[in-house]
Image (tube, grey):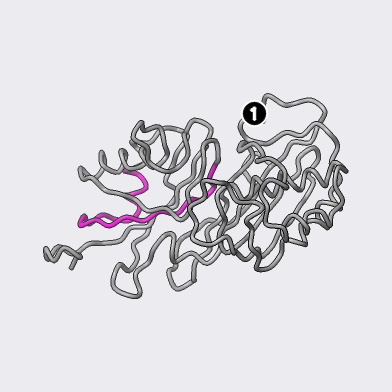
Amino acid sequence: MNESGSGVELKRIVLGVQYDGAPWHGWQTQPSGGTVQDTLEAAIKRFSLRDIKTTCAGRTDTGVHALEQVVHFDTDLTRDTFSWVRGVNAFLPPSVAVRWATEVSAEGQDAFHARFSATARTYYYVLYNHPVRSPLLAGKAGWVFRPLEIEPMREAARYLIGEHDFSAFRAAECQAKSPVKTMHDIRIERRGDLIVFTLTASAFLHHMVRNIVGSLIVVGNGNQAPPWLGRILADRDRSRAAPTFMPDGLYLAKIAYDEKWKLPQESTGAIPWL
């Protein structure tokens, strides 16, 4: 029975959604429209003939991509799970696609929640490190024309591992209740002229990944030594860290959940064009 006591049994549907963030003004719905959430909910309405609101695992900003955003919604409709994939995709533009769907528990303490049931998040940041920009990577990767050294950036990243107050990398408009998060892992790999940063944490503050990447670049180009990042973290002063880096190369890659939910998630493989 739903919370309204109407007697209608609601089902909780979970979707894995992939999108190119370049055409959109971020995930979260806006009065003017033009967001991924607005577009997804409009497609769900056209398929289901119902107004359905979605809840996501983590909001993304303008220009930020998602390999696998996870959303849930409640509905009284009975559909095969793959019908949600085919049906909703029929009304989505080429830059957004539902990759999978499943039904989960919506009852009591064991109810699944796309955001609150998540145990960790992984983001990729793809950086093109070359003297000349590439038009083929516009909107898909950040760009730095000065040479970057990988090892100093890796050394600096070690200061961020563990539970810390990440206020130094928090946007002023961040609405998180606490700046304390646990950084599980940061990997930095060079693949030709591309550098891929992979960050996994319990959760991220607004602009946290882009602010960290911007500060790592300051170390990689030799303007600061690796211990500088540790001092920035300890000082908890956003003004001392590097400016927020461009959104182009940021990808929400994976949301981790307990295996009990049996979500048909895709592996965190490489970005398709890498």
Quadrant hosting residue 70: bottom left
- The quarter of the rendered structure image containing the C terminus is top right
- Whether residue 64 is visible: yes
Query: Please, what is the three-letter code of the amino acid marked with disc 1?
Result: Ala
Residue that numbered label 1 is attached to = 138
Categorize mark 1 by other alpha carbons within 10 Å: few (<14), some (14-19), many (20+).
some
Image label count: 1
Question: What segment carries the magenta color?
Answer: 65-87
User: Does residue 180 lie above or below 237 as drawn?
Assistant: below
Judge from the rendering whether residue 254 lies leftward or rightward of residue 165; answer left or right: left
The x and y percentages for residue 6 are 11, 63
- Name the residue: 69% across, 62% down: 185
- Whether residue 89 is visible: no
User: Does residue 91 lie above or below 157 as drawn?
Assistant: above
Comparing 114 with 18, the one in front is 114
- Name the residue: 37% across, 48% down: 85
